[in-house]
Amino acid sequence: MSESCGSSADEKAAWMLGQWFLASLLLPVHISFEPPYEVGWGIQFFLLGAMNFPFIPIWWANPLFFWGLYCLAKGQYPQALYSASAASLLALSTFGLVIERYLQLQTFDGTFGPGFYIWLGCMIGLTVVSGARYRKTTRSRPRYGKLQLGEPFNLPATEGAIQDGKS
């Protein structure tokens, strides 16, 4: 297996997380406690964010998540970890908006539905899986040039370097 291609386990993990993401679109993500007792479905919020994506930074978690899935399936673990971490942070920033809205209105006008928590779990799950795979691959590689305590640090001379005080 080459380093540019992920294993079948990586592809299965990416496929499973993608299916959970799609399931989150079919479930309610916001439930209102006040009349008219509205329910906001995941697909509504996804499409609303897609139409207004420059103005809704939280929506950027979705393309970052898909990029992370692609990188995980291809075995590009550092890229998967970076995009999944950014997606998770953007998704978690939703709680900041809820707190801000509560401070403005002095009332809590609804709650998150199961679709939101599944969506958030997909983001965090991708971060955990890609982080574990990245750590596993970096631990299996030999490390050269590790210094011991008290050992002098000498850089190898390169062409054009100043040596013996002469230029």
Image (cartoon, rainbow, N blue to C red):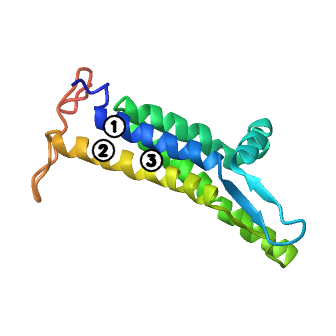
User: Which residue is disc 3 drawn over?
Assistant: 126
Are the residues flagged by discs 2 and 1 in contact, CB closer than 8 Å? yes
Q: Name the amino acid, label 3.
A: Leu
56 with respect to 12 (left or right):
right
Q: CA distance from mark 2 to mark 3?
A: 11 Å
Circle 1: is it few (<14), some (14-19), or many (20+) Cα within 10 Å? Answer: many
**Callout 2 amino acid:** Arg
Residue at the image position 55 percent from the left and 55 percent from the top: 118
Give the residue pinned by disc 1. 10
Q: Residues within 10 Å of mark 3 (few under 14, many from 20)?
A: many
SS of the residue at dot 1?
helix
Residue 83 position within the rendered picture, expressed as x and y whole percent measured from the top left: 50, 41
* Residue projecting furthest to the top: 159
Residue 10 in view in this figure: yes
The image quarter in which residue 3 lies? top left
Disc 2: which residue: 133
The residues tagged by marks 1 and 3 sit, at their Cα atoms, a distance apart of 11 Å
Towards the viewer: 65 or 81? 65
